[in-house]
Image (tube, coloured by chain):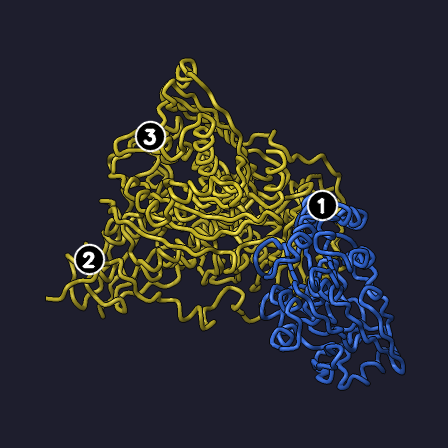
Amino acid sequence: MKTKKDISESIRKVDSEEKISGRAPYTSDISVEGMLYAKTVRSPIARGVIKNVKLPDMPEGYYTVDASDIPSRNVVSMIYEDWPVFAEKEVNFIGEPIMLIVGPDKETVMNLADNVEIDYEEKNPVFDFSNSGVRLHFDKGDVVNAFERAAKTIEYEYETGYQEQAYIEPQGFVGYIEDGGYTLVGSIQCPYYVKNAVMDTMGEDEDKVRVIQAPVGGAFGGKEEFPSVTACQLAVALKKIQKPIKFIYEREEDMETTTKRHPSKTKMEAALDEHNNIIGMRSRIGLDGGAYIGLSGVVLSRGMLAVTNAYTIDNLDVHGDVFLTNTVPNGAFRGFGAPQMIFAIEMFIHHIAKDIGEDPYVFRKRHMVKQGDKTSTSGTFRDPIILDDMIQKAVEISNYHDKAKAYEDRDTYKGIGMSWFLHGCGFTGSGESDIIKANVKLRKDDEDNVHILVAAVDMGQGPKTTFRKLVADILDVPIEQVTFNYPDTRYVPDSGPTVASRTMMVVGGLLARAAKTLKEDWKEGEEQTVVKQYEQPDYVEWDQDTMRGDAYPAYSWGVNVVEVEVSKVTYEVTVTNAWSIYDLGKAIDERIVMGQADGGQAQGIAYGYLEVMNHENGKLKQKNMTDYIIPTSVDVPKMENHIMDNPYPLGPYGAKGVGELTLVGGAPAVALAIEQAIGRKVRKIPATPESIMELIDNG
Amino acid sequence: MKHVIPKTYKEALEHLSEGTYKVLAGGTDLMVKNRSWSETPARFKQDMLYIHNLDELRYVEDKGDHLAIGALTDYETLLRHEAVPKVLKDCLIEIAGPAIRKVGTLAGNIGNASPAADGVLLLYLLDAQLVIERKGARREALIDDVITGPGKTTLSNEEMIKEIRLPKSTFTKTQFLKVGGRKADAISKVAFAGAVRIEDGIVKDLRMAIGAVNVTVVRLREVEKLHTGETISAVQDSIVSIKNAYVPHIKPIDDQRSNRVYRKRVAFNMIEDFIMNMHIQD
């Protein structure tokens, strides 16, 4: 009898070779005969009304494409519909697309685009947090009463900056006409978001729009909703010109005009009883949405739900706003609102403890979530929570307590910080069952090869490998017998977007169910198809209007410890060590999870101290990889990461979410370490050398 | 617009005498400055002279009292050469990444004349003499007298840098401290280079150069001279007046990489740090 290997045991990633060798056909590698090139003409002002457009003399074979060419609706269909395909009468941010110039010679296209003259009537742009576009609220218990009986209240404000996804491959599509319909091949996370948006803008039926994922060179959320904008523009151009078109952003264009992580401001106020227990909390979070709402309301919602992180607070009042400003629209980015909130709450808990003179570690442990506790939205933490064991392990491997004590000596200019956190897996609330309704399909051909048909995208995080591994393992066949090609909406059902740490837990979960069914019913040499649709776990109850109930079917958990040294001469931070422990249920491939752990922490820690982006009157100041600083291998510390199994009954082999979890705790961990090193409270990230100098000077 | 690729150095000087060219060596600045849409040529605004293949300008020679560096010698070659001073290597290893260092040159760094250029900072520190030629004529000049402002030099259209000469000197301590946005591959927010020779407790040679705090590198030779010949403690006791002497010259700007308050503070911290620790061997 052969013994089966543990599913977590790593195998070689199936697409490593094509990517390392350079053979993977990324969008910019695609060439179609007779292909034209498209370039965007953009607004140079933050807010105004278009008065007049004067085109240069257009040579034959060159075209303009603008709002007047849109067959159906000038709006990009996403969760909230306010983002135009092309600006028509007014412009609302610097870089807003007004038209495309399309033609065969790139230099000519570029020169024509440079010579479009547009007159504007400028209006006063808005950059402050004054114009709310989305307002959400929920509460728990009786916060008024809690504050009335409070022995003490403590209040702080926290701020976070922009973060740019900085994927290696910029946004892009190649489009062509096929059987009278539109085929778009591109660097995307969500084939069906793109397809649905294009159908809506073009007023076309399902069979007229085909979307194919090309190999994706990184996304991090940046290719969640934004590609729908360029896809709609390209489809309009295809309809008008009827020739193949390549439409790829340049690096600076991409950084200046595509979605980023929302800057935020959060106010937190805690009510403490006479035993220094937090009995209530009021919180108000504001996100800078940029010029259009897009996904910002949903980002805000995930942020608000994380308001108490891994702590139980009985009485809550939580307000949130997405503020519209005349800046580039912000959107999805790994963590989706949670990194801002987890930074705020982790710092706040520490700051409360410091203010009341209690050891933050003890104070935090006393408020930590236990199985059976109520969530921020009055749902229930049903599954076992092993956070205590995880913290114990993190403390041991990092020697946390000894270091925390030693670094209280300010002259060391060293610090150690520990964050612990959760991340809800999958769409919020009833999103999976009400909005997404995921479908997956397994098809077995008459040679018994099994084809995975789902719309999930491998953007580096590994489903090309892990889905095949999962299905092969359940079917007990070699992995070579299972295929998973790049999703093409002509062949794959809508298994939902590749977002929200849902790919393995939700889509993988459905695939596991499909594979079990296929195995039970396996007929050698016969074609067979199995389809599975998402069913909400019966215990989940959620009321979207009051934001009450179980916001997520399951949670992943993490602990990050970060150690730093700050230079007395230059105030620069050196991150010397990082340790982490994760409960993601069960790893489907340990090495892939470890890759997520390394990358997620590098990105999360850098968010806390390194990555700076800001705008001046709506114009981003860091618009290329020279000025927007992300960590190099020299900046990334030694890392020691561990997984602790805690299988989730409804996940495949017990798997929960992993992708976002590894990022969300990085910023508070590094900020807390810096806080200790300099002996000042950090309330704003990134904690740059410039801001550290100010803190040392002014407190 | 003309694009000329001369076969010899002599031919390059001929072309320069006949037209107005921009000279491109490694292209690590010019290709970035004139970048264009991918798959289209760089958007150069004047006639171009590409000297990258003039191997006769690639050499490092020990001339006894000085080191002669041919204008096209790339950073990686300098990093591997045994006669190149340690403090220059400490700087070069922090410039960009290996690919850029393989084509970037000190002469190009001078021609580009960025106040934040780390290579130029070290040339100031090491009293670099430049050999500048045009057809039929040669001149030599101290680096300080060639660079006049951001992107500005005294090089005429007919001239190009042929060689960089580094006078030999002995130091008991050197320091290169670069503050970039991160630990590698970053443009300096502010940078410092210092060198000192102490014999029997007496400061015999003291040099400090500061980058990215003014339109050119700041090196105050008169302040250095004032304290040459003093004891270590006499120099260190004068730290306040030394710093005061730099006040009119440390005038940094706000930009996308940092701000003036920070740059100024760190510049003075670095001066103080160097002076107060100049007697402590690495």
Residue visible at 77% across and 86% down in the picture: B8
Q: Position of residue A113 (x, y in %)?
A: 70, 57
Q: How many numbered discs?
A: 3
Whether residue B180 is visible here, answered yes or no, is yes
Whether residue A204 is visible here, answered yes or no, is no
Cα distance in 3D space between marks 2 and 3: 48 Å
Which kind of residue does numbered mark 1 sit on? Arg
Which kind of residue does numbered mark 2 sit on? Leu
Q: Assess whether mark 1 and mark 2 are in contact (beta carbons under 8 angstroms).
A: no
Q: Chain of mark 1?
A: B
Instruction: Say which of marks 2 and 3 sits in front.
Output: 3
Cα distance in 3D space between marks 3 and 1: 45 Å
Sequence-wise, which precedes: disc 2 or disc 3?
Answer: 3
Which kind of residue does numbered mark 3 sit on? Arg
Q: Which residue is mark 3?
A: A366
Q: Which residue is mark 1?
A: B260
Q: Chain of mark 2?
A: A
Q: Position of residue A613 (x, y in %)?
A: 60, 47
Q: Are marks 2 and 1 on the same chain?
A: no
Q: Chain of mark 3?
A: A
Cα distance in 3D space between marks 2 and 1: 67 Å
| Within-10-Å neighbours for mark 3: few <14, some 14–19, many 20+ | few
Instruction: Say which of marks 2 and 1 sits in front.
Output: 1
Q: Position of residue A153 (x, y in %)?
A: 46, 20
| Within-10-Å neighbours for mark 1: few <14, some 14–19, many 20+ | some
- Color used for chain B? blue
Q: Say if B50 sits above or below A440 in the image.
A: below
